[in-house]
Amino acid sequence: MQTLVARGGRAALHALYPPQCVACAAPVAEDFGLCPDCWRDVDFLDGLVCDACGLSLPGGPEDGVLCDGCLRVPPVWSRARAVFTYSGTGRRLVLAFKHGDRTELHRPAGRWLKKAAEPLLLPDTLIAPVPLHWRRLLLRRYNQSALLAQALARETGIECVVDLLHRPRSTGSQEGRDRAGRFANMTGAIRCTPRRMARIAGRPVLLVDDVLTSGATLAACAAALRAAGASDVTAVVLARVAKGG
Ligand SMILES: [Zn+2]
Ligand SMILES: [Zn+2]
């Protein structure tokens, strides 16, 4: 009966607000999905990727392969995955989510992140978003990484601590800085929240962010978590910039 009522309610809602593609607003069958054209245009990273940074690599399925960059300089975290490449419709989705108040995108994103993060999940994992400085949070009104982390937690049933990390000083934009500049700008910029410290020791932490570019921000997060005694640090992001900056 309840299901019938729920179904009736949804049908009425769909008559008023027909489901639309989250990227282009074309009509679709289900809420919070992509239309077939947009789906084809998103470069989902479901082939071979670098185990450490999620970068797309040529070749067939294989475990534990690393890209040249990660072979040269292994990241501070151990493994990472991304849902799609930061280009085309994938890039438009991230920008709409980040700057366009399209926060409903966390619904499909939670499902995609779950699929991408599956190889990274260990028992007792704690999910934590990359933090925003409070001034940026006031301007944007929401932390897009926290919305993604909470969506992933809902999909997986894994515990999420939104304020596990914080950003005590404003680092400004990373845009316009080269790779070394990005890392220098982020050094020591992220700390574990003192009252959450006790949660971290001995547990694996899965970091969640919207975009992975140079990895400087994730590295600062991972360094803080390792110093606090996390047993492992992994990362899952929505979009991976194809060529690390
Ligand atoms: Zn579409
Ligand atoms: Zn890599």
Image (cartoon, rainbow, N blue to C red):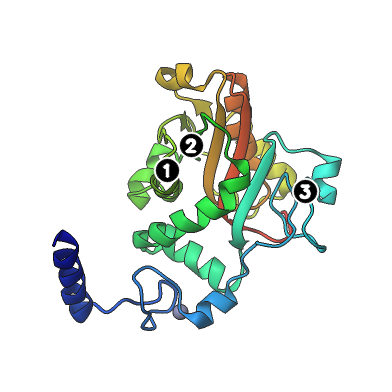
Q: Nearer the viewer, residue 14 or 140?
A: 14
Residue 157 lies left or right of residue 36; in this view the side is: left
Q: Residue at x 73, y 55 (%)?
A: 49
| Crowding at mark 3 (Cα within 10 Å: few <14, some 14-19, many 20+) | few
Residue 144 image point, x, y percent: 42, 51
User: Can you say whether 130 is above or below 139 in the image?
Assistant: above
Q: Amino acid at mark 2?
A: Ile
Q: Amino acid at mark 1?
A: Ala
Q: Residue at x 31, y 76 (%)?
A: 19
Q: CA distance from mark 1 to mark 3?
A: 25 Å
| Crowding at mark 2 (Cα within 10 Å: few <14, some 14-19, many 20+) | many
Residue 145 lies left or right of residue 227; in this view the side is: left
Instruction: Report the quarter where the N terminus lies.
Output: bottom left
Residue 68 lies left or right of residue 77; in this view the side is: right
Q: Nearer the viewer, residue 181 or 126?
A: 126
User: Can you say whether 193 is above or below 148 in the image?
Assistant: above
Q: Which residue in the structure is indicated by mark 1?
A: 153
Mark 2 vs mark 3: which is more N-terminal? 3
Q: Which residue in the structure is indicated by mark 2?
A: 127
Quadrant for residue 71, please give it: top right
| Label 2: which secondary element | strand
Mark 1 vs mark 3: which is more N-terminal? 3
- Badges 1 and 2: C-beta atoms under 8 Å apart? yes
Q: CA distance from mark 1 to mark 2?
A: 7 Å
Q: Does mark 3 have its CB less than 8 Å from ligand 2?
A: no
Mark 1 or mark 3, which is nearer to you?
3
